[in-house]
Image: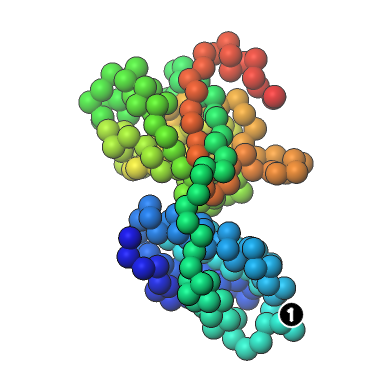
């Protein structure tokens, strides 16, 4: 992989800076950005409130009034990132966490499965097998709290986003578009093709860890029946 270097930084409002490393999705850059975010968290700099990794960059949220933040926040963020890169990022280690997600692919939960299978030129059963046997990695959390973008989708299922998005997608819906898959954390709008649903509560603000997923998680899918889905609802 080429040496990681920031392309630049831009403000995100008055209290955050986005440092970009790639304008397109590069899985090696994405992995390095996640390790950089972990490194920045570990430094526990008093003026940094949070570090949020994205697909090809990271957002540094800061306290603009903190005395430890001297000068321009953009410059401070870039200097901090540069210091980490000079020190050297931690090597990719063992998988820290694997999340198993039960998914029911029955027609009532998968309104777009037949269409996806037709576009992929496979039978619906093969589409289910392709989706459920892939190893996924959470690339970032975005769009909405707990909404995980996962890479690792089979190229055969790389269908485009739907021409007309739905105003409401049910919570737990499993959907695909291009080379990624997602699980909708609650009922929100969305334009991806829905091929299944999980009974898990993907996001719960009352939990100690509200989101089921975090950037860098490995995700495995377990196909389940309608009866199993009903047993697991709410657990």
Q: Position of residue 155 (x, y in %)?
A: 28, 37
Q: Residue at x 26, y 30 (%)?
A: 119
Can you name the residue that lies furthest to the top here?
227
Q: Residue at x 37, y 37 (%)?
A: 153
Quadrant (top left/top right/bottom left/bottom right) for the N terminus: bottom left
Location of residue 207 with respect to 14 vertically, above or below = above
- Looking at the rendered structure, the secondary structure element under dot 1 is loop
Q: Position of residue 70 (x, y in %)?
A: 66, 87
Location of residue 131 with respect to 189 vertically, above or below = above
Q: Which residue is mark 1?
A: 66
Residue 38 is at least partly visible in this image? yes
Label 1 CA crowd tier, 10 Å (few <14, some 14–19, many 20+): few
Location of residue 173 with respect to 165 vertically, above or below = above
Front residue of this view, candidates 235 and 133: 133
Whether residue 8 sits left or right of residue 49 in the image: it is left
Residue 52 is at least partly visible in this image? no
Front residue of this view, candidates 29 and 12: 29
Front residue of this view, candidates 63 and 145: 63
Q: Determine the image quadrant of residue 117.
A: top left
């Amino acid at each position: 992989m080429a040496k990681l270097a920031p392309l630049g930084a831009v403000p995100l409002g008055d209290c955050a800076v986005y440092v970009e490393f790639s304008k397109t999705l590069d899985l090696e850059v994405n992995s390095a950005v996640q390790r950089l975010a972990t490194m920045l968290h570990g430094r526990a700099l008093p003026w940094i409130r949070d570090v949020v990794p994205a697909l090809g960059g990271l957002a540094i949220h800061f306290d603009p009034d903190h005395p430890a933040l001297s000068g321009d926040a953009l410059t401070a963020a870039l200097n901090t990132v540069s210091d980490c890169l000079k020190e050297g990022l931690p090597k990719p280690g063992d998988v820290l966490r694997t999340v198993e997600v039960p998914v029911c692919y029955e027609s009532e939960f998968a309104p777009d499965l037949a269409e996806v299978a037709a576009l992929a030129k496979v039978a619906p059963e093969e589409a289910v097998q392709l989706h459920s046997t892939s190893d996924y990695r959470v690339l970032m959390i975005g769009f909405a709290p707990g909404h995980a973008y996962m890479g690792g989708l089979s190229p055969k299922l790389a269908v485009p986003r739907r021409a007309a998005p739905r105003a409401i997608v049910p919570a737990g819906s499993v959907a695909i578009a291009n080379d990624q898959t997602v699980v909708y954390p609650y009922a929100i709008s969305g334009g991806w093709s829905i091929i299944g649903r999980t009974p898990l509560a993907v996001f719960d603000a009352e939990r100690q860890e509200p989101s089921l997923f975090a950037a860098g998680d490995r995700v495995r899918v377990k196909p389940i029946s309608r009866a199993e889905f009903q047993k697991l609802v709410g657990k």
